[in-house]
Image (cartoon, grey):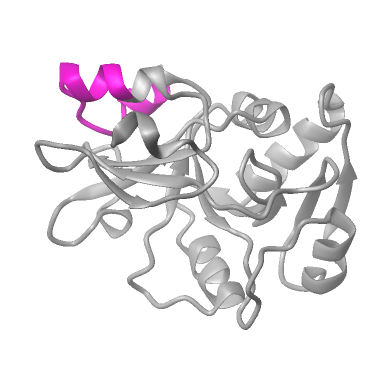
Amino acid sequence: MATYLEVHPDNPQPRAIGQAAEIVRDGGVIAYPTDSTYALGCRLGNRAGMDRIRTIRALDAGHHFTLLCNDFAQLGQLVYLNNTVFRAIKAATPGSYTFIVRATDEVPRRLQHPRKRTVGVRIPDHVVARALLAELGEPLVSSSLQLPGQTLPLTQGWEIKEQLDSVIDAVLDSGQGGIEPTTVIDFSRDQPEIIRKGAGDPSRFE
């Protein structure tokens, strides 16, 4: 059974956040809130955890996970940023954006696009997600919590616990979640390209 951790959306209890982080460190898969939707996450390098997330969501081996970071310093260790890209991403973070950027050697090859050597990264604008990332002290491998056959992601912690109790290790519940995924911006070329319009305002990149 999954551990159920109910936290305040603006003042998450440190003990619950610490417990969730410890489950991730021990190789667990958790469901947690972000500024777009609830997501599934595991530790960077946890291949079995990524396989479990793919199974839960019925994703193929080519699915591209997102790396959630607590701050810009952490993000900068994962991707190469020239001055133009740095300024554009800095101005939009934290926020409901995923940025596709060329990966550094800190990112395992299996998380990179096989040809472009890119990876999706983001800094969420969500108190609970940021608290979890700060406690963890490292990026979190993440995928939106939308189950096979469903048109919208799960938005309630109790519902996630009910449906995924036997296949994940913890649910971090901070109340109602969103239904819009992040806006995805590809910075792998000379000009930014909007790949998906979502919760983040895309106009700054148009």
Q: In this rendered view, identify the residue nearer to me: 88 or 168.
A: 88
Quick check: 68 left or right of 15? left
Residue 4, position as x, y percentages in the image? 88, 52
Q: Position of residue 38 (x, y in %)?
A: 68, 51
Which residue is at a point 30% across and 33% down the rendered structure image? 205
Q: Is residue 25 visible?
A: yes
Question: Residue 128's quadrant in the figure?
Answer: top right
Please state which of residues 136 and 71 is positioned toward the viewer in this rendering: 71
Q: Residue furthest left?
A: 190
* Image side of residue 148 versus residue 20, left or right: left
Residue 78 at least partly seen: no
Residue 84 drawn in magenta: yes
Task: Provide residue 116's location: percent of width, then percent of height.
Answer: 14, 54
Q: Is residue 154 above or below residue 100?
A: below
Image quadrant holding the N terminus, namely bottom right
Q: Quadrant of the C terminus?
A: top left
Count of all numbered marks drawn on residues in the image: 0
Q: Main secondary structure of the magenta part?
A: helix
Position of 57 with respect to 123 (left or right) is right
Name the residue at 17% across, 50% down.
117
Name the residue rendered at 57%, 70% in the picture: 52
Highlighted range, magenta: 74-88
Residue depicted at x 26% and y 54%? 112
Q: Residue furthest bottom?
A: 149
Q: Looking at the image, which is closer to me, 163 or 98? A: 98
Q: Is residue 175 left or right of residue 149?
A: right
Residue 85 colored in magenta in the image: yes
- Is the residue 17 above or below the residue 47 in the image? above
**Position of residue 201 measured from the top left corner of the image (x, y, whole percent):** 47, 36
